[in-house]
Image (spheres, grey):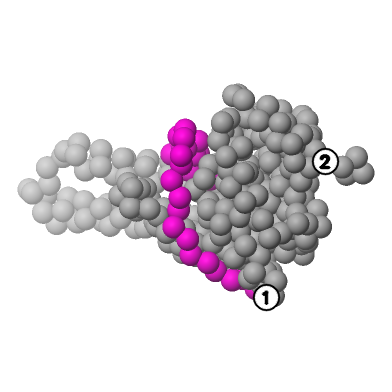
Amino acid sequence: MAFSVVMPVFNEGGLIAQTVGALVQALSGERDYEIVLVDDGSRDSTWADISALCAEDPRVRGLRFTRNFGHQAALHAGMQAAVGRAVITMDADGEHPPELVPVLLEKWRSGAKVVQTLRQAPRQLSWLKRRTSGAFYAVFSWLAETRIQAGSADFRLLDREVVTLLAQHPNAAAFLRGFVPWTGFETAYISFEQGIRTMGRSKFTPGKMMALARKGIIGFSVKPLRLSSLLGALTCLIALATLVHTLVIRLAFPAQAEPGWATIASLLALLGGAQLLTMGILGEYIAVMFETLRNQPPFIVAERRGFPTER
């Protein structure tokens, strides 16, 4: 099979058929492909819509999770199920334009192993969203050994060689945006203007964005641990300087030394804050180690639709 298109779907009942229709229209010049829809534990009519699409079009396949495992896990599951020589991942909410898919295919056929899109945020996007998104890419690139281009989206094409590598990596499902550039394969970049949802609201809440950012930074860098050590050393120096200053005043100028709780309280707050921050950073890394040692599957598939019996 020439290529596969993977779409994670969560509570997009009523919209998924529209998105798939637009994609099929954009691929009217292609014949040998499949569309893999991964239902990430939706609670509306999403799975019924996917089942209907599978019955209507033999190129459409469906996977349904037992519960919500997250966007990255859904992408990983779709990549494992796809059999195309290239795999295109994109969202099903209309923000990733289907008409750009032929351009990704053209770049791949020209030799690129990875074709990564760079999102140009629409003018309607809030100032806060723009700033936090840019800040994340800047912080991640500074902390991690892997650099992510600003605006990198989960709308990309991966050659089968890259897909096989990521599908076998036990931790790739945590943060694909970091693991894809980490592979080091030749990459072509395409800019696009993010589309606007035609119905419903985004399921990628600020809490989920923060969790994804945390997984990305903790999974790709040990710099936070080193920075916490530096913070601890700096705090000790400040405390030592304050202690020396206090002793000098007490011994050299006893008349000027006035006992007070402000200095003690400030030092205690400074030391306590530094300790808690360091313990929190250590805790994040220990949590990642614990999750890895548990060796739990990143997702569980409950049902499959439209896949050939031999798969």
Of helix, strand and loop, which one carries label 1? loop
Would residue 43 be visible to someone looking at this image?
yes
Amino acid at the residue labelled 1: Ser
Magenta stretch encompasses residue 195:
yes
Image coordinates for residue 202, horizontal then vertical, percent: 47, 37
Q: Is residue 264 left or right of residue 294?
A: left
- Identify which residue is drawn at 61% across, 37% down: 17
Instruction: Specify the quadrant that holds the C terminus.
Output: top right
Q: Are marks 1 and 2 in contact (CB under 8 Å)?
A: no
Q: In this orientation, which residue lies closer to the viewer: 45 or 150?
A: 45
Callout 2 amino acid: Phe
Give the number of the disc on residue 19: none
Closer to the camera, 24 or 43? 24
Say the numbered circle drawn on residue 110.
1
Quadrant of the frame with the N terminus: bottom right
Classify 10 Å Cα crowding around label 1: few (below 14), some (14-19), many (20 and above): few
Q: Nearer the viewer, residue 250 or 260?
A: 260
Compare residues 303 and 217 and report the one nearer the observer.
303
Residue labelled with disc 2 = 307
- The location of residue 172, given as percent across then percent down, is 68, 52
Q: Residue at x 83, y 41 (%)?
A: 307
Other residues around mark 2 within 10 Å, as few (<14) / some (14–19) / many (≥20): some
Which residue is found at the position 57% from the left and 53% from the top? 98
In-image side of 57 versus 204 (left or right)? right
Q: Nearer the N terminus, badge 1 or badge 2?
A: 1
Q: Which residues are magenta?
A: 184-212
- Quadrant in the rendering for residue 109: bottom right
Q: Is 191 displayed left or right of 34 in the figure?
A: left
117 to 310, vertically: above or below: below
Could you tell me which secondary element the residue under label 2 belongs to?
loop
Residue 157 picture location, percent across and down? 65, 60
List x then y, in percent, for residue 9: 61, 38
